Image (spheres, helix red, strand yellow):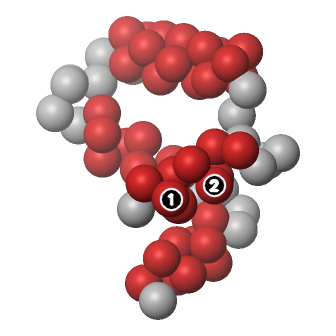
Amino acid sequence: MQELFEKERNTSKSLNESEFSNLKLEISSCKLAYNVPMDELPRLIFLSFIGIPGVTQQLVLFKK
């Protein structure tokens, strides 16, 4: 699993530091703006993540 993480981290498609900071800021601001409880936040983030085009095809590869 660590190898997969490192490989994904080193690809050109991975988030750079600025994009990662923006993502954290978006998550925090959405949580506050929509008054989302902390126990609902991970589920909503995951649903948004799998809604990104191409992500579900990549998740299928992890099963193998």
Picture residue at 50% right of the left edge, 59% below the top: 3
Q: Is residue 26 visible?
A: no
**Residue at the outermost left position:** 39
- Pointer 1: residues within 10 angstroms few (<14), some, or many (20+)? few
- Label 2: how many residues lie within 10 Å, few (<14), some (14-19) or many (20+)? few
Q: Mark 2 is on which residue type?
A: Lys
Q: CA distance from mark 1 to mark 2?
A: 6 Å
Quadrant of image for the N terminus: bottom left
Element type at mark 2: helix
| Towards the viewer: 38 or 55 | 55
Mark 1, residue position: 3
Above or below — where is 23 with respect to 57? Answer: above
Residue at x 52% of width, y 72% of height: 59
Left or right, 44 with respect to 6, comes to left
Give x and y (percent) for residue 40.
23, 37
| Tag 1: amino acid | Glu
Q: Where residue 39 appears, x then y in whole percent?
A: 16, 33
